[in-house]
Image (cartoon, helix red, strand yellow):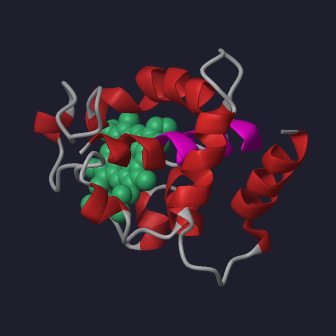
Amino acid sequence: MADIAVCAWAFLAGCAPDSPPQRDLVMEVAAAMGEGFDTPASRGGELYSRYCSVCHGATGRGDGFNAFNLNPKPRNFSDSAFVSHLDTALIRETISRGGSAVGLSSLMPPWRNTLTKRDLDDLVIYVIELSATE
Ligand code: HEC
């Protein structure tokens, strides 16, 4: 179990930046680690509800209560076809440095000064996990 977790962290930290997105691996690890509070997926869920759901919506559909203010609106994270086109490193970069740093809307705020590295990793896992719902 500990070994599996180490692989996942190494992957998310960008040790394999040239690999294609390995959603299945990330999701398997997230599932294998169970549903306790301190797992990456459940920590990511807590953080997401607190910081992200106002815009991205509780289930990631881009329908948070603040979404009417946004143009363009956030994309649908529950759409697995959309999320599978996103690179894990790019998701992390977008969350860390904000939309304007990756050519998206500057209405997507940067979080690197607010959240820890671990928070960012857990949010990446959670965003990928949201896409498993459709
Ligand atoms: C103030 C509203 C707002 C908040 C809060 C917000 N986002 Fe966003 N986010 C956006 C918008 C708008 C976009 C779409 C930008 C675009 O398509 O140009 C976006 C895009 C993204 C993307 C890129 C997806 C893509 O279209 O390629 C990711 C990943 C993301 N947000 C994750 C998060 C996470 C995780 C949080 C919480 C830590 C968060 N966002 C908080 C507004 C927000």
Q: Is residue 7 above or below residue 124?
A: below
User: How far across and how far down the image is residue 79, in percent?
Assistant: 24, 53
Task: Give the magenta part as a residue range.
Answer: 116-126
- Does 53 sit left or right of 50 as displayed? left
Q: Quadrant of the N terminus?
A: top right
- Does 80 sit left or right of 91 as displayed? left
- For the point 53% across and 58% down, the residue is 24
Q: Nearer the viewer, residue 35 or 123?
A: 35
User: How far across and how far down the image is residue 101, in percent?
Assistant: 49, 67
Residue 44 appearing in the image: yes
- Magenta-highlighted stretch: main secondary structure? helix
120 drawn magenta: yes
User: How far across and how far down the image is residue 68, in percent?
Assistant: 10, 36
The image quadrant that residue 72 belongs to is bottom left
- For the point 65% across and 15% down, the residue is 37
Q: Nearer the viewer, residue 16 or 74?
A: 16
Q: Quadrant of the C terminus?
A: top left
- For the point 55% across and 78% down, the residue is 20
Residue 112 appearing in the image: no
- Residue placed furthest toward the bottom: 18
- Residue placed furthest toward the top: 37
Q: Is residue 50 above or below residue 91?
A: above
User: How far across and how far down the image is residue 23, in percent?
Assistant: 52, 60
- Does 77 sit left or right of 62 as displayed? right
The image quadrant that residue 133 belongs to is top left
Q: Is residue 113 above or below residue 107?
A: above
119 drawn magenta: yes
Q: Nearer the viewer, residue 63 or 106?
A: 63
The image quadrant that residue 44 belongs to is top right
